[in-house]
Image (cartoon, grey):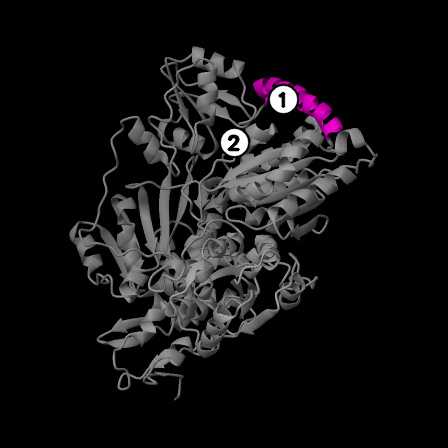
Amino acid sequence: MTKSVMIVGVGGQGSLLASKLLGAVLLNEGYDVKVSEVHGMSQRGGSVETYVRFGDKVYSPIISKGEADYILSFEKLEAARFSEYLKKGGEIIVNTQEIDPMPVITGAAIYPGNILDELIGKGVKVDAIDALELAEKAGSAKAVNIVLLARFAKKFDIPYEKWIAAIEKAVAPKFVEMNKKAFKMGYEL
Amino acid sequence: MKKLMIGNEAVSRGLYEGGIKVVSSYPGTPSTEITEFLAKYDDIKSEWAPNEKVGAEVAFGASLAGVRSACAMKHVGLNVAADPLFTLSYTGVNGGLVICVADDPAMHSSQNEQDSRHYAIAAKVPMLEPSDSEEAYEFSKAAFDISEKFDTPVILRMCTRVAHSQSIVETGERVEIPDKPYVKNGAKFIMVPANAIKRHVVVEERTAKLKEYAETCPFNRVETGGTDIGIITSGTSYQYVKEVFGDKVSVLKIGMPNPLPEKLILDFAAKVKKLYVIEELDPIIETHCRNLGLKPIGKELFSPLGEFSQETIAKAFGKPLKETVKTDTAVPVRPPMMCAGCPHRGLYYTLAKNKVTVIGDIGCYTLGAQPPLCAVDSTLCMGASVSGLHGFLKANDKAANKTVAVIGDSTFMHSGITGLVNIAYNCTNATVIILDNSITGMTGHQQNPTTGYNIKGDPAGKVDLESLCRAIGIRRVRVVDPYDLKACDTAVKEELAAEEPSVIISRRPCVLLKYVKTAPPLKVNKEKCRSCKKCMTLGCPAVSFKEGKAHIDATLCVGCEVCKGLCPFGAIEKEGE
């Protein structure tokens, strides 16, 4: 049975690293894995979505509407934007940080502040955390991706050490300690 | 070794193991990483070329000299390299030659969604098309053998979802291919009419042989799954078909879309009750089927627009859609935009403020078209800003004092120079602005001939833009710092007014470059802020309006001070002011 995880956020928030780590850990567990990334134009502050799929045999690298077991959202509005992709009974893990998109900045639109409540009201399982605060405590606002990945990792039966090993392998040496700290904070939250 | 690789890394691994020795490419999403990964191998000569035509010709030269070579480009890059491609088909190769081209259905990062398979047909060269990383690796490795066996360049066609999806690849070892001797052979390599007439005959004979090969080529395969439904498919569409149907339908998976097999398709069609062709973009396989007298269901059910998914297939076959949850509240769109501190912003602000018509080009700076700046009037293709401006002014010379071209440093190297030569030669009173951010930005920071570094980051030749423009014959060449709004305003006004062609070089390195030191974030003094929203007209993602006052997001602001220079009330301050 193929499981689907969608990683969404704003271009520049580090979804590529999160999907790389997740892919490496799942491969190590013996799964067939496919990860679909976003490059180029869409990375420049736009909405980005990365798909991670794993199971015995995975064909499609992408996730269609109503298929995601989990949505990992680095930003609140993006969780709402991609909620359509969530499977019935699926779960959204979301960073409560708000990043205004350009139409909100220019005043052409309003940032819908209570959008998570609306999703909860519709029966969606939402796990909302302030990942930015934890990332800053760990040493960098950029570690939001690692904090959220850790929160997500806890829902799986994969030992903590294996995630840490993946971080040590994938991250540049000078950022390893900070990312390990961020992972620990997200995991122990 | 088993490894997760994006398709582009798998291509590079396949080419590497296949014995490649020279690669020359121009970056372009979604093809860029093929060459970047190749550059990691020390036993390959890897280079960024100024454009795709140069890259393809470098690969030709290396092949002529007797080694296996390649070039990589995005789909529109093949338009630029089309000239060498069509005659390379006639000359054939000495060392194997692979042209990797990556299509971008759904235009994730492109100006059109042309289908590169047309090129393989038109140039009469074989094309391979993988559907995941494993195949990308395998096909790339085999492409050199096909190239040398049939004496032809081979096109490897990727698409975004194969190029940028990771899947598992089992890699092997590099084969050491001895260099072939270079032997002068004018009849094969000097394409003057007398020789080319004879080579065309060879091309037709080769096509006949390739058609025969297509019947048994291991990359075209039948997966039997009953006789009710038969689906002919290729590339990423194959994965979606398998996702929906598994082994419940029969599939003819095409890995070599040119030339297409005939007997294999007719045999497959004869064994199934209903025949479908599922392919993204244009009906290439479908048209081939129709030419064979078959009547498959194709484009009437599967759109020529955009990319597919398992949902596309499920929907077309009337399968129930998955249950979804959607918010009732509208979610504002989040289009891509210029980064906080982007050096292009100050220049664009100046152009918008002066109500200048801007003939634009391809790169990060195309984002200047977005609100609130809305500072770009056209974007066509690489280099079209400079030559387009010339045409615009030929049609209406009165527009010379309010029209400019903007083009990035890398794009100017790619195909802006010839346009500037045209301006100097055919004399228009044009103002060309080179947005020099010292890198090829949009594709993810590749070096180019103006940066002084090569693909490996080692010091290299460096084109001096000012000297180049002067040598072309432009006498008015000036440099401005786009963070300095006053200097930008003066430069734009003076050069638009000048009665001769001029070039403004707007120079500041991309703020995302590792060596660029950013300043601490600025803040808004709420007492001084009079809510005039002037700072908001810059369209900086770090500047917003909260509780009736301007607000600067400290996590995004890089302290470029462009907004500070704009605020009439001195309300934007540095930390500690």
Identity of the residue furthest to the left in this view: A121
In this rendering, position of residue B103 left or right of residue A132 = right
Image vertical order of residue A7 relative to residue B321, above or below: below
The residue to which callout 2 is attached is B118
Residue B207 highlighted magenta (yes or no) = yes
The amino acid on which the numbered mark 1 sits, given as a three-letter code, is Thr
> Residue B404 at what x, y percent from top left?
47, 62
- Mark 1 is surrounded, within 10 Å at the Cα level, by few (under 14), some (14 to 19) or many (20 or more) other residues, namely some
Image vertical order of residue B428 relative to residue B542, above or below: above
In this rendering, position of residue A39 left or right of residue B21 = left
Q: Nearer the viewer, residue A175 or B280?
A: B280
Q: Nearer the viewer, residue B53 or A68?
A: B53
Asked if one can make out residue A85 in the rendered structure from this viewpoint, the answer is yes
Identify the secondary structure beneath mark 1: helix
> Residue B372 at what x, y percent from top left?
33, 64
- Mark 2 is surrounded, within 10 Å at the Cα level, by few (under 14), some (14 to 19) or many (20 or more) other residues, namely few
> Residue B558 at what x, y percent from top left?
44, 73
In this rendering, position of residue B108 left or right of residue B57 = left
Mark sitting on residue A166: none
Identity of the residue furthest to the bottom in this view: B577
Q: Which residues are magenta?
A: B193-217
Mark sitting on residue B207: 1
The amino acid on which the numbered mark 2 sits, given as a three-letter code, is His
Whichever of labels 2 and 1 marks the residue nearer the N terminus, that label is 2
Which of the image's four quarters has the C terminus of chain B? bottom left
Question: In the picture, residue B568 is in which quadrant?
Answer: bottom left
